[in-house]
Image (cartoon, rainbow, N blue to C red):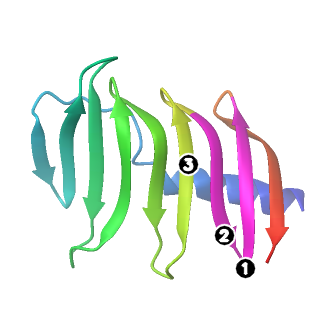
């Protein structure tokens, strides 16, 4: 079970690898299917991130706050499932995904997985 959870943590990190720090000065920018849109400036620079595949299908979306992932990021998987990762100013909080027909939640502390819970359907 520990090996399964470790491999799951590595998958989670790779899934959301594109949610890294961001430097952005323009209100809208497109590159390789990625769209960045400035959506707020109240508590910092809030930028909406959207990534599309070559066919125009949504692959991933989330927001950056002052260049760091913030809030809920969603990845749309080819099998129709979604994986979500909740960030707080760049720190991972929890990831929710489905693996082998089970809903899995992985909780993070200091950006490292600390606890996981799997639910059967």
The kind of secondary structure element at disc 3 is strand
Mark 3 lies on residue: 85
Identity of the residue furthest to the right in this view: 1
Residue neighbourhood size for the residue with mark 1, other residues' Cα within 10 Å, grouped as few (<14), some (14–19), many (≥20) = few
User: Decide: marks 1, 2 in contact (CB < 8 A)?
Assistant: yes
Q: Which residues are magenta?
A: 92-109
At x 55%, y 55%, the residue is: 84
Describe the element under mark 2 as helix, strand or loop.
strand
Check the image and report above or below for 102 versus 61: below
Residue 120 placement: quadrant: bottom right
Which residue is nearer to you in this view: 87 or 121?
Answer: 121
The residue at which mark 1 appears reads as: 101
- Which secondary structure class fits the magenta region best? strand
Residue 94 falls inside the magenta stretch: yes
Q: Nearer the viewer, residue 16 or 121?
A: 121
The answer to whether 49 appears left or right of 91 in the picture is: left
Query: For the point 51% across and 82% down, which residue is it?
Result: 79
Where residue 109 appears, as percent x and y from the top left, is 72, 31
Residue identifier under label 2: 98
């Amino acid at each position: 079970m520990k090996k399964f959870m470790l491999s799951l943590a590595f998958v989670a990190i790779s899934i959301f690898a594109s949610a890294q720090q961001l430097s952005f000065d323009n209100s809208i920018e497109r590159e390789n299917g990625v769209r960045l849109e400035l959506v707020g400036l109240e508590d910092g620079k809030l930028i909406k991130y959207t990534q599309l595949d070559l066919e125009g299908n949504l692959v991933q979306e989330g927001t950056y706050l002052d260049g760091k992932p913030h809030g809920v990021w969603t990845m749309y998987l080819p099998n129709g499932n979604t994986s979500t990762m909740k960030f707080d100013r760049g720190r991972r909080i929890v990831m929710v995904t489905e693996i082998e027909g089970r809903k899995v939640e992985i909780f993070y502390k200091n950006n490292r997985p600390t606890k996981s819970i799997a639910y059967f359907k």
